[in-house]
Amino acid sequence: MVHADVPDDPTAYKRQEYWEERYAKEESFDWFKTYEDLKPLLSQHIASKDARILMLGCGNSTLSEDMYDDGYHNIVNIDFSKTVIENMAEKCKERVGMEWLEMDIRDLKFEDGSFDIAIDKGTMDALMCDRGDVWNPDEELVRTVAQEVDEVVRVLKVGGKFLYITFGQPHFRKRHLERPCWTVETSTLGVAFHYFFYHMIKQDTPSS
């Protein structure tokens, strides 16, 4: 694993140019937790290994590879970095059926109700890197995050689940996740330093 370079300006995490440059020289990096850490919770919330899974902002994490090797063979990985998508597609070419697509999480090119599971491991956190007040984020940040969540709602099937792994505490994250079609539930991981596992199930509502 190549350790991440921490930019002087945290807003760099929101810029595509930063990721293109970073992925050109970095083979693999996992934010927060690995599959082994997450496996108990993922197994609990993904009922079938045949589920169609959307990995939002996949980056060069090993999560999709490890899930595939554990039997989840219907994974669609997206990222707005052309570099990382090309690199990961080549790296995982022996994993038949796993897809790698260059795409913006705020503008998904999928049909409504086409996924059983959507997973975000740290991607939303990158969108939220800002120098502003975390208690009162600016309108652009709120709008950007809402675009991702709204697109997830759209592409999930009724009964589908949105799973979000982050270090963001509920009083900072929950308000961005709340929608009429689901209830936001939270689990925690870790001992000394907590990570949070948000899980939401899309319900059939008049607005959905």
Image (tube, rainbow, N blue to C red):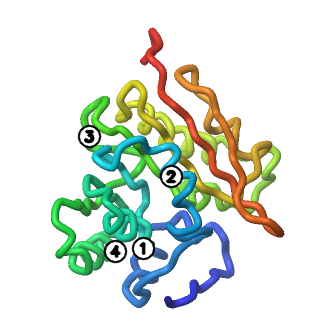
Residue drawn at x 44%, y 32% is: 153
- The residue at which mark 2 appears reads as 42
- Front residue of this view, candidates 122 and 40: 40
C-alpha distance separating marks 1 and 4 = 12 Å
Q: Quadrant of residue 109?
A: top left
Q: Around disc 2, counting alpha carbons within 10 Å, would you say few (fewer than 14), some (14 to 19), or many (20 or more)?
A: some
Q: Where is residue 96 drawn, in percent x and y?
A: 16, 65
- Front residue of this view, candidates 172 and 93: 93
Residue drawn at x 31%, y 30% is: 113
Residue 62's label in the rendered image is 1
C-alpha distance separating marks 4 and 2 = 24 Å
C-alpha distance separating marks 2 and 1 = 15 Å
**Dot 1: element:** loop
- Give the mark, 2 or 1, whose residue is nearer the N terminus: 2
Q: Around disc 1, counting alpha carbons within 10 Å, would you say few (fewer than 14), some (14 to 19), or many (20 or more)?
A: some
- The residue at which mark 3 appears reads as 110
Q: Classify 147 as above or below 169.
A: above
- Give the mark, 4 or 3, whose residue is nearer the N terminus: 4
Along the horizontal axis of the image, is 101 left or right of 187?
left
Q: Classify 123 as above or below 192.
A: above
**Dot 4: element:** helix
Give the mark toward the camera: 2 or 1: 2
Name the amino acid type tagged 2: Leu
Name the amino acid type tagged 3: Phe
Residue 84's label in the rendered image is 4
Q: Classify 121 as above or below 148.
A: below
Along the horizontal axis of the image, is 120 left or right of 20?
right
Disc 1 + disc 4, Cβ < 8 Å:
no
- Give the mark, 2 or 3, whose residue is nearer the N terminus: 2
Quarter of the image with the C terminus in it: top left
Name the amino acid type tagged 1: Thr
Q: Where is residue 203 drawn, in percent x and y?
A: 48, 21
